[in-house]
Each structure stands twice: as structure tokens, then as C-alpha cells.
Amino acid sequence: MVILGLVLGGALGFLFLCGVLLRWNDVKYRSEGLPPGTMGWPVFGETTEFLKHGPSFMKNQRARHGNLFKSHILGCPTVVSMDPEVNRFILMNEGKGLVPGYPQSMLDILGRWNIAAVHGALHKSMRGVLLSLIGPTAIREELLPKLDYFMRSHLCGWSGQTVDIQERTREIAFLTSLKLIAGIEAGKIADKLKEEFSMVVLGTLSLPIDLPGTNYRRAFQSRKKIVSMLRELVRERRRSSSTESRDMLSSLLQTEPKTGRELTDDQMIDLLITIIYSGYETVSTTSMMVLKYLHDHPRALQEVREEHLAIRRRKSTGEAIDWEDYKSMNVTRAVIYETMRLATIVNGVLRKTTEDLQIKGFTIPRGWKIYVYTRETNYDPFQYPEPLRFNPWRWQDKSLESHHYFTLFGGGSRLCPGKELGVVKISIFLHYFLTSYRWEEVGGEEILQFPRVEAAKGLHIRLRDY
């Protein structure tokens, strides 16, 4: 009985301590005018619940507190917004009391000069440099022929194989980025970089706890190795007198003095890391999920395949896809947009307040984060009727892409500069995949939706000639 009493007493004491800590954290962040909400544990806040339960956590908080609520996630007191009007205001008004507010883990791992982190004149300058490398003009004149050749050669010979299409799309997205950036082909350097980038991706959504075994520590160590490799690559290019290289790195080095937008080596390396990182996850995951949705929706598969077969009939054997062919891929573009909307590859964006901000009758204090949670906007039944149904035909209404609450690629001055390049990569991948193969899924692998979209055990498909 004595032992039982001690156990019960210890349990009650522990529960009391937990209650005190939770109450203390709520009181600590209580301020007149803040939206309602809970703050969770000291230091950790509600990050564990957020990362583990994601959408259900957000829906529960929304049901309790409304479209604007406070929380403490990813190491910072945060106001979460699921209000389309507020989201648009935040995205369109950078500089007016708002700057990028990405988690410290992401800033440490992707670099302080990551274009998503800088703001003001530096962001404008770096965005200009980036658009000169990956904007529509560069795609049409330089990048599209390289992408076509890469996809055509990389996708041949798959017939009869059973492959993990998740791993294959990751490999394709990563190798296309290396090819376009520095002309790097598959091999030891590419394999080493891919290994390190896999760790970087895992660490970008983690608490910045620098202890052995944490995703943050592993990702930060991987970043150091990537920076070292890229720095050596830049040195080699500068030492070389050859002008034969025609890739993003050579363009960047050759045009710096002419444009007056010269970047430091650190800024240049972080820019290259940004290009690789953004293409690695969003392009690969969208490519995989497009195939998943097309497999599950035969009518959509038939229409998008016919679009690509019609293009092939207009061209001679082995003739490359050109810009006009790409611009004619209307069904393909609709399928890509619907996949991004329904799968929600990117859940939202973060901003940080530089002054007290008045929104919807609430006061958000200086130094707080605002999480523009666009996932719920993607499922808004007023904008997207039957929002949980895969319906690419909804994008035949061209006004949908220019709608005020269209946030698949961000918004305002932060509209994703790689938007068109990402869509081109996926479109060319689909062109050669759909005109070459039929496929069936092997098994019923579960697709996880949060904190990132992935098939936990891979998505295995068996291929045969079309």
C-alpha cells in the first residue's frame, strides 16, 4: 500500500507540474489583443503536436479558436492564419511591418543568404539574378533543350522493371538541377551531393537543437559538406579559362560584372543550394503524386496522355519538345495544378513582424511569426467546389489561376521565381513517361500528407511499354 501510495503521489505530482508548466507558458505569452489559442510547453511549445498530427492539430485549433489563433511552433510564438483575406494581405504587404520568418533550423541549414530569408534591396537583387537563370526567357532559350535531352535519355529502358517511383522522381529532380546548374552528370559527385541533400531536407523542419543524433545536427553537418563541394566547384570554374560550359554557374560568373549584381561567394552558394533544394522536394513529390492521381483516375490519364501523343504525332522521331509544344500542354498544366492543390506539397509560408501589427481587430506583437497556412485555402469549398475530389478540369477556368486567393506558388513579391521551371520539368517528365509506358501499382503503399508528402515505404510500380 505504501508503494502504491508513493506511485500515485508521484503521478499526481507529475500531472500537477505539467499543468503548472502549461499554465505558466500561456501566461508568459498572454498579451492584450492577441488572438485566442494555446502555447503548449515551455521552449518546445506545440511543435511536437504540430509535426506529428499536422492537419488534424490545425483543424482542432481552428474549431476551438477560429481562423486566427496563437500557438508556439518551430521554436517561436506564432499566429496561425487560415483566413483567405488575411493570408492575401500578409503575402501582398511584405516590408510593411513584415519580413520573412522561416524557422531558425531552415535558415541555418539553407543559409542566411537563402532567397527565402533575405528581404528588401538584397532580395530584389537576388531575385533578379535568379530570374535571369531560371525565368521564362532562360527556359525557352537555354534550359528546355537540356531538360528534353535529359528526360528522354533518363527515362528510356524502364519497361519490364518494377521501380520505386518516389525514389526515381527524387533522383530525376536532383540530377536535372545539377545538370542545369553545373553540367554535373550522374556519378560519384552527384551521389555524394544527393546523400547530403537528403539529410538537409529532413532537417529543415525540425527544432534547432544542436545535439548528436538530431535531424538538425545531421542536416547542419551535411550543409557544411555541400558548401565545401560547391565552393570548390566555383573555384575550379574561376581557374578555368574555358568558355565551353553553358550552365547556370557559368552564366552567373560571366554576367556578374556586366549586370552590376555581383554576389559574394557565400551568396552565390546559398543561391545554388536554394535552386537544388526547391527543385528536389517540390518537383519530385509533385511528379510522383501526378502519377498516383492519374493511376487512380483513368479519364484524366487518358486525356493527358492523348495530349502528349498528339504532340508526338506532330514531330519527327527523336525531335525535341520546344517552347510552343510546352505551351500547348493545357491538360498537363491543369493536372499539375490540381495535384499541387490536392496533395498540398507546400503547406504554408512564414512571416515575422517587425512592429506591432493590427489584423482583424487583433494585435500581433513585434517579433512574432505569422504562419500563412495555405493548406486550408486549397480546400476552401467556395473557391474549389468539392475540394477533396481530384478534378483537373476545374482549371479550364483560366480565371482560377489569377484568383485573389490562388496561393499554390506563394504571392506578391515572393511569388516563387522557379514556378515556370518546376512546371516545365514535370511536364517534360510526363511527356516521355506517358508516351513510353503503362504502369500498375505493386501493393497499396500509404501516402503520408504531413509534415511533407511522401510514401513512407516507397511507391512501387511495374512498367511495360505503351
Image (cartoon, rainbow, N blue to C red):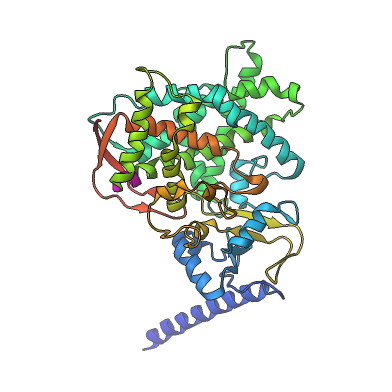
Start-end of magenta stretch: 292-296
Q: How many numbered badges does the structure rendering display?
A: 0
**In the picture shown, does residue 348 fall above or below 144?**
below
The x and y percentages for residue 79 are: 62, 64
Q: Is residue 165 left or right of residue 148?
A: left
Q: Is residue 283 above or below residue 350?
A: above
Residue 190 is situated, as x and y percent measured from the top left of the image, at 47, 27
Q: Which quadrant of the structure image shows residue 141?
A: top right
Quarter of the image with the C terminus is top left
Q: Is residue 140 visible?
A: yes
Task: Give the quarter of the image for residue 369.
Answer: bottom right
- Tell me what residue is drawn at x 51 percent, y 54 percent: 347
Q: Can residue 186 be seen in this view?
A: no
Q: Which of 84 and 463 is in front in this view?
A: 84
Residue 319: quarter of image: top left
Asked if the magenta segment contains residue 267, the reply would be no
Q: Nearer the viewer, residue 85 or 347?
A: 85
**Quarter of the image with the N terminus in it:** bottom left
Closer to us: 297 or 80: 297
What predominant SS class does the magenta segment belong to?
A: helix
Say which residue appears at 32% left-offset and 30% top-offset. Answer: 435
Most extreme residue toward the bottom, as rendered?
Answer: 1
Q: Which residue is drawn at 77% across and 26% down?
A: 260
Q: Where is residue 283 in the image (x, y as percent from the top left)?
A: 47, 39
Indicate the position of residue 45 as horizontal and vertical percent values: 57, 66
In the picture provided, is 398 more to the left or to the right than 453? right
Classify 275 as above or below 371: above
Residue 198 versus residue 459: which sits nearer the camera?
459
Residue 261 located left or right of residue 351: right
